[in-house]
Image: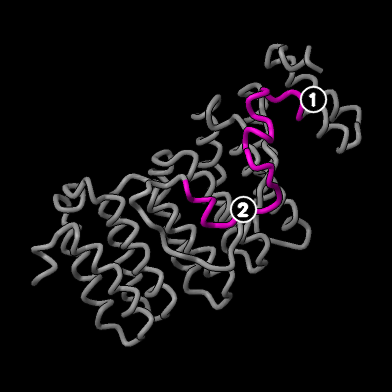
Protein backbone atom coordinates (compact mmCIF):
# COMPACT_ATOMS: atom_id res chain seq x y z
CA UNK A 1 0.00 0.00 0.00
CA UNK A 2 3.01 2.27 0.43
CA UNK A 3 3.49 1.89 -3.31
CA UNK A 4 -0.01 3.26 -3.96
CA UNK A 5 0.46 6.09 -1.48
CA UNK A 6 3.35 7.36 -3.58
CA UNK A 7 1.56 6.72 -6.87
CA UNK A 8 0.31 9.56 -9.10
CA UNK A 9 -3.10 10.93 -8.16
CA UNK A 10 -4.88 9.59 -11.29
CA UNK A 11 -3.73 6.09 -10.31
CA UNK A 12 -5.18 6.51 -6.83
CA UNK A 13 -8.46 7.76 -8.27
CA UNK A 14 -8.59 4.79 -10.65
CA UNK A 15 -7.97 2.35 -7.81
CA UNK A 16 -10.94 3.77 -5.87
CA UNK A 17 -13.10 3.54 -8.99
CA UNK A 18 -12.15 -0.11 -9.46
CA UNK A 19 -12.97 -0.92 -5.83
CA UNK A 20 -16.45 0.50 -6.43
CA UNK A 21 -16.90 -1.41 -9.71
CA UNK A 22 -16.05 -4.73 -8.08
CA UNK A 23 -18.36 -4.07 -5.08
CA UNK A 24 -15.61 -4.42 -2.50
CA UNK A 25 -16.97 -4.36 1.05
CA UNK A 26 -17.21 -0.78 2.43
CA UNK A 27 -15.07 -1.59 5.46
CA UNK A 28 -12.27 -2.87 3.22
CA UNK A 29 -12.61 0.11 0.88
CA UNK A 30 -12.37 2.49 3.84
CA UNK A 31 -9.23 0.76 5.10
CA UNK A 32 -7.58 0.88 1.68
CA UNK A 33 -8.53 4.48 0.93
CA UNK A 34 -7.23 5.64 4.30
CA UNK A 35 -3.82 4.26 3.33
CA UNK A 36 -3.82 6.36 0.17
CA UNK A 37 -3.90 9.57 2.16
CA UNK A 38 -0.68 11.51 2.72
CA UNK A 39 1.08 10.46 5.93
CA UNK A 40 0.90 14.01 7.25
CA UNK A 41 -2.88 13.68 7.47
CA UNK A 42 -2.97 10.72 9.86
CA UNK A 43 -5.08 10.67 13.00
CA UNK A 44 -2.28 11.38 15.43
CA UNK A 45 -1.37 14.54 13.55
CA UNK A 46 -4.99 15.65 13.54
CA UNK A 47 -5.34 15.12 17.28
CA UNK A 48 -2.13 14.91 19.33
CA UNK A 49 -4.08 13.88 22.43
CA UNK A 50 -5.39 10.78 20.68
CA UNK A 51 -8.97 11.74 21.50
CA UNK A 52 -11.76 10.73 19.16
CA UNK A 53 -15.52 10.90 18.84
CA UNK A 54 -16.75 14.40 19.60
CA UNK A 55 -15.18 17.79 20.09
CA UNK A 56 -16.44 20.24 22.73
CA UNK A 57 -17.46 23.51 21.13
CA UNK A 58 -14.91 25.46 23.14
CA UNK A 59 -12.08 23.40 21.66
CA UNK A 60 -13.54 23.37 18.16
CA UNK A 61 -13.29 27.13 17.81
CA UNK A 62 -10.06 27.58 19.71
CA UNK A 63 -8.39 28.38 16.41
CA UNK A 64 -10.26 31.69 16.27
CA UNK A 65 -8.36 34.81 17.17
CA UNK A 66 -7.52 34.82 20.87
CA UNK A 67 -8.80 38.35 21.32
CA UNK A 68 -12.18 37.41 19.84
CA UNK A 69 -14.31 35.54 22.39
CA UNK A 70 -17.29 33.84 20.82
CA UNK A 71 -20.86 33.50 21.95
CA UNK A 72 -20.95 30.77 24.61
CA UNK A 73 -23.25 27.94 23.56
CA UNK A 74 -23.85 25.07 25.93
CA UNK A 75 -24.64 21.41 25.35
CA UNK A 76 -23.53 21.41 21.70
CA UNK A 77 -20.74 19.14 20.53
CA UNK A 78 -19.24 18.72 17.10
CA UNK A 79 -18.70 15.17 15.94
CA UNK A 80 -15.38 14.47 14.32
CA UNK A 81 -15.54 13.07 10.81
CA UNK A 82 -13.01 10.89 9.03
CA UNK A 83 -11.20 12.88 6.32
CA UNK A 84 -11.98 11.94 2.72
CA UNK A 85 -9.15 12.44 0.23
CA UNK A 86 -9.55 13.02 -3.49
CA UNK A 87 -6.77 12.81 -6.03
CA UNK A 88 -8.09 14.46 -9.19
CA UNK A 89 -10.39 17.30 -10.13
CA UNK A 90 -12.61 14.86 -12.04
CA UNK A 91 -13.03 12.68 -8.98
CA UNK A 92 -14.19 15.63 -6.87
CA UNK A 93 -16.53 16.90 -9.58
CA UNK A 94 -18.09 13.43 -9.91
CA UNK A 95 -18.80 13.37 -6.16
CA UNK A 96 -20.64 16.69 -6.36
CA UNK A 97 -22.50 15.58 -9.48
CA UNK A 98 -23.83 12.50 -7.70
CA UNK A 99 -24.98 14.57 -4.73
CA UNK A 100 -27.07 16.88 -6.91
CA UNK A 101 -29.52 14.06 -7.64
CA UNK A 102 -30.25 13.58 -3.94
CA UNK A 103 -31.16 17.24 -3.38
CA UNK A 104 -33.54 17.58 -6.31
CA UNK A 105 -37.16 18.34 -5.44
CA UNK A 106 -38.71 18.18 -2.00
CA UNK A 107 -37.48 16.17 0.95
CA UNK A 108 -39.05 12.72 1.21
CA UNK A 109 -38.68 9.39 2.95
CA UNK A 110 -36.74 8.26 -0.09
CA UNK A 111 -34.08 10.97 -0.14
CA UNK A 112 -33.61 12.48 3.30
CA UNK A 113 -31.03 9.92 4.41
CA UNK A 114 -29.06 10.38 1.18
CA UNK A 115 -29.10 14.11 1.84
CA UNK A 116 -27.77 13.62 5.35
CA UNK A 117 -25.06 11.26 4.10
CA UNK A 118 -24.13 13.79 1.41
CA UNK A 119 -23.71 16.52 4.04
CA UNK A 120 -21.47 14.21 6.04
CA UNK A 121 -19.43 13.49 2.91
CA UNK A 122 -19.02 17.24 2.32
CA UNK A 123 -17.67 17.57 5.86
CA UNK A 124 -15.27 14.69 5.19
CA UNK A 125 -14.07 16.31 1.96
CA UNK A 126 -13.55 19.56 3.85
CA UNK A 127 -11.54 17.69 6.49
CA UNK A 128 -9.44 16.04 3.79
CA UNK A 129 -7.28 17.62 1.12
CA UNK A 130 -9.95 19.18 -1.12
CA UNK A 131 -9.76 22.63 0.47
CA UNK A 132 -6.00 22.81 -0.10
CA UNK A 133 -5.32 20.85 -3.28
CA UNK A 134 -8.56 21.65 -5.14
CA UNK A 135 -9.68 24.85 -3.43
CA UNK A 136 -11.49 26.50 -6.34
CA UNK A 137 -13.17 23.27 -7.47
CA UNK A 138 -14.33 22.52 -3.93
CA UNK A 139 -15.81 25.99 -3.38
CA UNK A 140 -17.48 25.90 -6.80
CA UNK A 141 -19.02 22.58 -5.80
CA UNK A 142 -20.27 24.00 -2.51
CA UNK A 143 -21.80 26.97 -4.34
CA UNK A 144 -23.52 24.67 -6.84
CA UNK A 145 -24.94 22.61 -3.96
CA UNK A 146 -25.87 25.61 -1.84
CA UNK A 147 -29.60 25.24 -2.48
CA UNK A 148 -29.40 21.61 -1.39
CA UNK A 149 -27.36 22.42 1.71
CA UNK A 150 -29.95 25.02 2.70
CA UNK A 151 -32.72 22.45 2.17
CA UNK A 152 -30.88 20.31 4.70
CA UNK A 153 -30.46 23.23 7.12
CA UNK A 154 -34.20 23.98 6.97
CA UNK A 155 -35.28 20.35 7.30
CA UNK A 156 -37.70 19.43 10.07
CA UNK A 157 -35.53 16.38 10.74
CA UNK A 158 -33.14 17.53 13.45
CA UNK A 159 -30.29 15.24 12.42
CA UNK A 160 -30.41 16.46 8.80
CA UNK A 161 -30.62 20.11 9.85
CA UNK A 162 -27.65 19.60 12.17
CA UNK A 163 -25.55 18.08 9.38
CA UNK A 164 -26.44 20.97 7.08
CA UNK A 165 -25.34 23.47 9.72
CA UNK A 166 -22.17 21.51 10.38
CA UNK A 167 -21.23 21.70 6.70
CA UNK A 168 -21.48 25.50 6.76
CA UNK A 169 -19.60 25.77 10.06
CA UNK A 170 -16.70 23.64 8.96
CA UNK A 171 -16.43 25.04 5.44
CA UNK A 172 -16.44 28.55 6.96
CA UNK A 173 -13.61 27.64 9.32
CA UNK A 174 -11.53 26.15 6.52
CA UNK A 175 -12.25 28.65 3.76
CA UNK A 176 -13.22 31.90 5.46
CA UNK A 177 -13.56 34.60 2.82
CA UNK A 178 -14.22 31.91 0.22
CA UNK A 179 -17.84 31.99 1.45
CA UNK A 180 -18.18 35.75 0.94
CA UNK A 181 -20.31 35.39 -2.24
CA UNK A 182 -22.69 33.08 -0.37
CA UNK A 183 -22.91 34.81 3.01
CA UNK A 184 -26.06 36.81 2.20
CA UNK A 185 -28.31 33.83 1.48
CA UNK A 186 -26.69 31.82 4.26
CA UNK A 187 -27.49 34.45 6.87
CA UNK A 188 -31.06 34.82 5.64
CA UNK A 189 -31.74 31.12 6.14
CA UNK A 190 -29.76 30.65 9.34
CA UNK A 191 -31.30 33.60 11.17
CA UNK A 192 -34.71 32.29 10.20
CA UNK A 193 -33.69 28.94 11.71
CA UNK A 194 -32.72 30.74 14.93
CA UNK A 195 -36.32 31.85 15.36
CA UNK A 196 -37.71 28.33 15.12
CA UNK A 197 -39.36 26.42 17.93
CA UNK A 198 -36.89 23.52 18.00
CA UNK A 199 -34.25 24.35 20.59
CA UNK A 200 -31.45 22.24 19.10
CA UNK A 201 -31.97 23.59 15.58
CA UNK A 202 -32.18 27.13 16.91
CA UNK A 203 -28.91 26.72 18.81
CA UNK A 204 -27.24 25.20 15.77
CA UNK A 205 -28.37 28.18 13.72
CA UNK A 206 -26.96 30.53 16.35
CA UNK A 207 -23.59 28.80 16.41
CA UNK A 208 -23.41 28.71 12.61
CA UNK A 209 -24.15 32.43 12.26
CA UNK A 210 -21.54 33.24 14.90
CA UNK A 211 -18.88 31.18 13.10
CA UNK A 212 -19.78 32.71 9.74
CA UNK A 213 -19.47 36.25 11.10
CA UNK A 214 -16.12 35.40 12.67
CA UNK A 215 -14.70 34.03 9.42
CA UNK A 216 -16.08 35.86 6.37
CA UNK A 217 -15.09 39.35 5.30
CA UNK A 218 -17.05 42.20 6.85
CA UNK A 219 -19.62 44.04 4.79
CA UNK A 220 -22.53 46.29 5.67
CA UNK A 221 -25.10 43.61 4.85
CA UNK A 222 -23.86 41.50 7.76
CA UNK A 223 -24.44 44.43 10.11
CA UNK A 224 -27.90 44.94 8.61
CA UNK A 225 -28.81 41.29 9.28
CA UNK A 226 -27.79 41.71 12.90
CA UNK A 227 -29.96 44.84 13.14
CA UNK A 228 -32.94 42.98 11.68
CA UNK A 229 -32.40 40.18 14.22
CA UNK A 230 -32.39 42.74 17.04
CA UNK A 231 -35.91 43.69 15.97
CA UNK A 232 -37.22 40.14 15.52
CA UNK A 233 -40.51 39.31 17.19
CA UNK A 234 -39.01 36.12 18.65
CA UNK A 235 -36.72 36.43 21.63
CA UNK A 236 -34.13 33.86 20.44
CA UNK A 237 -32.81 35.91 17.48
CA UNK A 238 -32.77 39.04 19.64
CA UNK A 239 -30.76 37.21 22.28
CA UNK A 240 -28.40 35.60 19.79
CA UNK A 241 -27.87 38.92 17.99
CA UNK A 242 -26.16 40.32 21.09
CA UNK A 243 -23.49 37.61 20.74
CA UNK A 244 -23.16 38.02 16.97
CA UNK A 245 -22.60 41.74 17.41
CA UNK A 246 -19.97 41.12 20.08
CA UNK A 247 -18.21 38.65 17.79
CA UNK A 248 -18.23 41.18 14.96
CA UNK A 249 -16.95 44.01 17.15
CA UNK A 250 -14.08 41.99 18.57
CA UNK A 251 -13.18 40.65 15.14
CA UNK A 252 -13.02 44.13 13.62
CA UNK A 253 -11.53 45.87 16.67
CA UNK A 254 -8.25 46.46 14.84
CA UNK A 255 -9.99 47.38 11.59
CA UNK A 256 -12.50 49.95 12.84
CA UNK A 257 -12.56 51.71 9.50
CA UNK A 258 -14.34 48.70 7.96
CA UNK A 259 -17.35 49.56 10.09
CA UNK A 260 -16.96 53.33 10.26
CA UNK A 261 -16.65 53.98 6.53
CA UNK A 262 -19.69 51.95 5.50
CA UNK A 263 -22.30 53.39 7.84
CA UNK A 264 -22.08 50.33 10.04
CA UNK A 265 -21.23 52.25 13.19
CA UNK A 266 -24.67 53.86 13.27
CA UNK A 267 -26.26 50.42 13.06
CA UNK A 268 -24.02 49.14 15.85
CA UNK A 269 -25.23 51.97 18.11
CA UNK A 270 -28.86 51.30 17.17
CA UNK A 271 -28.50 47.61 17.98
CA UNK A 272 -26.98 48.31 21.37
CA UNK A 273 -29.62 50.88 22.31
CA UNK A 274 -32.37 48.54 21.16
CA UNK A 275 -30.95 45.61 23.14
CA UNK A 276 -30.39 47.59 26.32
CA UNK A 277 -34.05 48.64 26.24
CA UNK A 278 -35.42 45.23 25.23
CA UNK A 279 -38.46 43.92 27.10
CA UNK A 280 -36.67 40.62 27.76
CA UNK A 281 -34.19 40.72 30.69
CA UNK A 282 -31.97 38.10 29.04
CA UNK A 283 -31.50 40.26 25.98
CA UNK A 284 -30.74 43.29 28.10
CA UNK A 285 -28.16 41.40 30.17
CA UNK A 286 -26.39 39.99 27.13
CA UNK A 287 -26.34 43.35 25.39
CA UNK A 288 -24.67 44.93 28.40
CA UNK A 289 -21.70 42.64 27.82
CA UNK A 290 -21.66 43.63 24.16
CA UNK A 291 -21.81 47.30 25.16
CA UNK A 292 -18.54 46.99 27.06
CA UNK A 293 -16.85 45.52 23.98
CA UNK A 294 -18.16 48.51 22.05
CA UNK A 295 -16.91 50.90 24.76
CA UNK A 296 -13.36 49.54 24.52
CA UNK A 297 -13.27 50.21 20.76
CA UNK A 298 -15.17 53.52 20.62
CA UNK A 299 -14.98 54.98 24.16
CA UNK A 300 -16.14 58.45 23.11
CA UNK A 301 -19.21 57.00 21.38
CA UNK A 302 -20.04 54.82 24.36
CA UNK A 303 -20.14 57.77 26.76
CA UNK A 304 -22.95 59.50 24.87
Q: Which residue is mark 2?
A: 55
Q: CA distance from mark 1 to mark 2?
A: 32 Å
Question: Residue 10, percent across and down?
Answer: 70, 15
**Image quarter of the C terminus:** bottom left
At a point 53% along the width and 28% down the height, the residue shown is 132
Question: Residue 190, percent across and down?
Answer: 47, 62
Which segment did they paint magenta?
34-62
Magenta span includes 176: no
The quarter of the picture where residue 301 lies is bottom left
At a point 68% along the width and 46% down the height, the residue shown is 51
Name the secondary structure under disc 2.
strand
Which tag, 1 or 2, sits closer to the chain's start? 1
Question: Residue 212, percent across and down?
Answer: 43, 52
The quarter of the picture where residue 19 lies is top right
Q: Which residue is mark 1?
A: 17
**Image quarter of the N terminus:** top right
Q: Is residue 187 positioned above or below 180 on the image?
A: below
Q: Nearer the viewer, residue 164 or 240?
A: 240
Q: Is residue 131 positioned above or below 89 on the image?
A: below
Amino acid sequence: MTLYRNAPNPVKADLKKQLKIFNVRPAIVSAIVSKLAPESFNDTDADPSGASGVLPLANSISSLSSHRPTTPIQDLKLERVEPLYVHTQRELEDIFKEMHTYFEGKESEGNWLKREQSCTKLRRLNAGNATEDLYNVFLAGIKSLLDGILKAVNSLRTSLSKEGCSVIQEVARSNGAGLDPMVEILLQNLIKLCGGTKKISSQQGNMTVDILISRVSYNLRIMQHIWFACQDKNVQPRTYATGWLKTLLNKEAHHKSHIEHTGGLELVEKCIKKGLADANPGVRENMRSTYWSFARIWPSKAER
